[in-house]
Image (tube, rainbow, N blue to C red):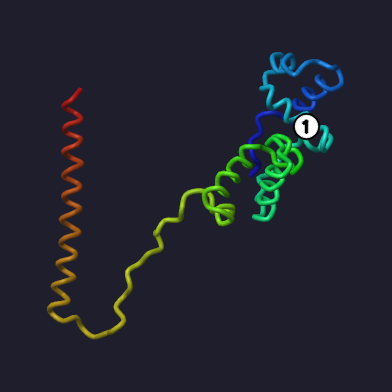
Amino acid sequence: MERKVKYTFKFKLECVKLVLEEHNPITYVSTIKGPSRANIRKWIGFYKEYGEIGLLPSKNQSYSVDFKISVIRFIELKKTSLREASIKFNIPDSAIIIKWQRDFANFGVNGLNSQPRGRPKSMSNFKRSKRTSDKPLSREEELLLENERLRCELDLLKKLQALIQAEKTKKRKP
């Protein structure tokens, strides 16, 4: 599944050429075409560094910890801006670098490790351990199991009653 892109390759190229070849100011192109001045500046930087290929939409990319550290060190040593660093290292958005810097400052190198994305897996595959022995249950064990089953049933009935009460109060209010 491809990422949805807000601006097409042709549109970006047209904006960049309006600035570089026709010598229009960035603010003029921004008001005529619609994208922000920051986006146009970023597109121009990628175009100057990588040519037309730099304007192609980027794929979702994961970066190694060493690469992230080298980007952070480069910014600290060379005192470059985030936009310059993102263009030099071909990172599509400088907000990514900001996140790396924050994670590195808060958690060190461990903060730069890739973390799983999305919702965590649920415990739907959790099952109670089955009895291992074939011996019949003692009277005490049977009573404990029945007690647990009855507690669950009672909890379920309480929740059902609470839902019914909530619906009744909701109907009365309007």
Residue extending furthest right? 21
Q: Position of residue 131 (x, y in %)?
A: 29, 78
Nearest the camera: 48 or 18? 48
What residue is drawn where x is 65% and y is 45%?
60
Q: Residues within 10 Å of mark 1 (few under 14, many from 20)?
A: many
The quadrant where residue 101 appears: top right
Residue drawn at x 18%, y 40% as measured from the top left: 164
162 left or right, relative to 65: left
Relative depth, front residue between 27 and 66: 66
When asked about the image quadrant of residue 40, the answer is top right
Q: Out of 95 and 78, give the one closest to the viewer.
A: 78
Which quadrant: the C terminus?
Answer: top left
Residue 137 image position (x, y, % from top left): 19, 80
Note whether 16 is above or below 99 in the view shown. Answer: above
In the rendered image, the vertical position of residue 118 relative to residue 57, given as above or below:
below
Residue type at the position of mark 1? Gly
Q: Quadrant of residue 76?
A: top right
At x 20% / y 53%, what residue is drawn? Answer: 156
Mark 1 — residue? 45
Residue drawn at (69%, 14%), measured in percent from left and top? 31
Indicate the position of residue 75 as horizontal and vertical percent values: 69, 42
Residue 67 in the figure: left or right of residue 109: right
Horizontal and vertical percent position of residue 34: 67, 18
> In what element is the residue under mark 1?
helix
